[in-house]
Structures are given as C-alpha cells and as structure tokens.
Amino acid sequence: MARPRTPPELRRTPQQDRSRMMVERIIAAGQTVLLRDGYEKASTNRVAQEAGISPGSLYQYFPDKDSILNAVIDRYSDELSARLTKVLADRLDLPGPELVRATLEGLLEALAENVEFLRLVVEQLPRAQFGDKAAATEQRVSDLVSTYLVLQPSARVQDPAAAAWLLVRLVEHVTVQYVLERPAIAEHLFIDELTRIVTSYLGPTTRPR
C-alpha cells in the first residue's frame, strides 16, 4: 500500500511510521473540528484536543491552523480527483454520451459521500486562500477532457482546451449545487439533461477550419 502523500505545509517531513501516524491523526482531527465548529471557530488548540495531543506536539508538524486545514482540503481534493480522473481515463475510448454519463454518475457518487464537508468547503472556506488545490484538480480533469475532444474528429469545437475548461467548470458548479440543494429533480433526469448539454460539443458537425 502506498504511503500517504506528505502535505507541503508540514514543518518537517515525518520519517518514521509513528510520525506519519501522528500527521494522519492531526489531519483527521482537523477535518472533525472543521466540520463540527466551522472555519472561523477552528483552532490549533481544538485540533490538538480532538487529536488527544498537546499543542506543542501539533506545532512540531503544522505551524498554524490554516496549514492543517490546507492538508485537510488537499486530502479531500486528492481523493476526489483520483476517483474522477480514473473514471475518465478508463473510459476515453467510449462514445461521448456514455463517457459523460459515467463521469457524471461517478462525480455525483463521490460528492454525495460527505455532503456536509462539501457544503463547508463551498460555503465557508475562502476561495482565495484554499482554492489552489481545487484549481489544480480542475486543470487535471480539463486536460483529460481536452485530450478526449482532440481524439473526437466530430467534436464541434474550435479550441479543445477552451471547451474543456468551460465544460469542466460548468459540470462542477451544476453538480455541486445539485448535491447541496437537492432540487425536486430525479437523479436520472438530472444526469440525462446535463449529459445532453455536455454532448452538444460532440455532435456530428465537423470542427470549423
């Protein structure tokens, strides 16, 4: 099993299993405190208390509250990105509608696993401070979508990279809001309609010269 990636905000890189377990313990406590108390009330003291360690032990690895929360967001974003890119990468040879539907189903499933944490990330965390990881995830997915569009001679787009940027952010925003708001729209109808919108880029019209 691969070892967890070391968050870049750490004061020091944990070299021993005990240290790595401590880092994981702090990150897990950080997520619990963030969910329970919200961003404004979260603090290093509360995280240390939740982790069952002294503040001094916490400061050996994380310099402040935001470094812990960055690690929490990194972990969440990495897991979401890995699941979504795997769905895409495993299905790049499928026809457009099948690829889009499979991707939307995978995204909805991943987002719905922890709705309250998703709500906190979207509604409480300052995008300017914690948005780098989300931007990196969006770019990785955009690159895969752009590759797919390049491989589709019938895609009705002039610039695959630009179309991918637009599509990824459109799907992200609409899907997140669907999960958070839960409107009176059946999930299969939501997927049907969003698939129709996205696959409009993949119609029979040839790419303009």
Image (tube, helix red, strand yellow):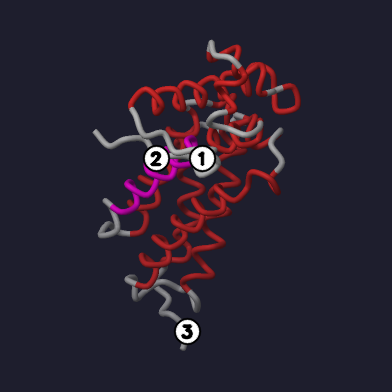
Mark 2 is on which residue type? Answer: Arg
Query: For the residue carrying disc 3, how many other residues have a C-alpha within 10 Å: few (<14), some (14-19), or many (20+)?
Result: few
Q: Secondary structure at mark 2?
A: loop
Against 8, is 76 above or below? above
* Residue 90 placement (x, y as % from top left): 26, 51
Q: Nearer the viewer, mark 2 or mark 1?
A: 2
- Which residue in the protein does label 2 denote? 5
Q: Nearer the viewer, residue 14 or 82?
A: 14
The answer for how far apart the CA atoms under marks 2 and 1 are is 10 Å
C-alpha span from label 3 to label 1: 40 Å
Q: Residues within 10 Å of mark 2 (few under 14, many from 20)?
A: few
Contact between marks 2 and 1 (CB within 8 A): the answer is: yes
Q: Which residue is mark 3?
A: 208
Hey, what amino acid is under mark 1? Asp
* Magenta span dominant secondary structure: helix
Q: Tell me the tag on residue 13.
A: none
The residue that mark 1 highlights is 74
- Residue 87 in the image: above or below residue 45: below
Residue at (60, 46) in percent of width and height: 173
Bin the neighbour count of mark 1 within 10 Å (Cα to Cα): few under 14, some 14-19, many 20 and up.
Answer: many
Assign a secondary structure to mark 1.
helix
